[in-house]
Amino acid sequence: MQAGTPQGSSLSPTLYNIFNSDFPQNDKVLNCLFADDSAILIQGSIIKFVIETLQTQILCFENWCTQWRVEINTDETKAILFRKGHLNKILKALAFFDEELNWEKQIKYLGPISTTM
């Protein structure tokens, strides 16, 4: 084992909390962290604001990952927008570790599948 703790170790939850204690925080963002699954949630009525805030948080997350040498599987990284009604315009793509994140119609997070309308 090069990093981490053995699965089922009684120390794992405590060490995980210590390791993530300096995860980037923002009063406009809700970070949902569970083991190796993470979600960054932003709420707002102005789509441009939501996308810009999300991109800023992604950049902070990138810096944190680089600092702590956390490797992210960008192939499994997804973006989704929930809103009332239909969106007729194309959303600006997000950038994550120099790769473009496209907006998905549905994603799977911790088992359940979430779908946009």
Image: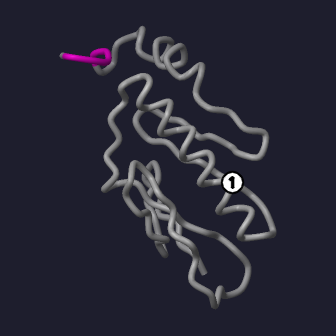
Q: Secondary structure at mark 1?
A: helix
Please tell me which residue lies in front, 62 or 6.
62
On screen, residue 31 above or below 1: below
On screen, residue 77 above or below 46: above
Of the 4 image quadrants, the one containing the N terminus is top left
Q: Quadrant of residue 102?
A: bottom left
Which residue is depicted at the point 50% across and 30% down? 64
Residue 89 vs residue 68: left or right? right
Asked if the stretch drawn in magenta spans residue 95, the answer is: no
**Residue bearing mark 1:** 53
Q: Residue 28, image x and y in percent?
A: 77, 46
Please tell me which residue lies in front, 98 or 50.
98
Q: Residue furthest left?
A: 1
Q: Quadrant of residue 35?
A: top left
Which residue is depicted at the point 53% across and 23% down? 20
Q: Residue 39, image x and y in percent?
A: 54, 47
Please tell me which residue lies in front, 103 or 111.
103
> Which residues, given as a range, are shown in magenta?
2-6
On screen, residue 37 above or below 47: above
Which residue is depicted at the point 60% across and 81% down? 117
Which residue is depicted at the point 70% across and 61% down? 50
On screen, residue 115 above or below 37: below
Q: Quadrant of residue 47?
A: bottom right
Asked if the stretch drawn in magenta spans residue 5, the answer is: yes
Q: Residue furthest top?
A: 11
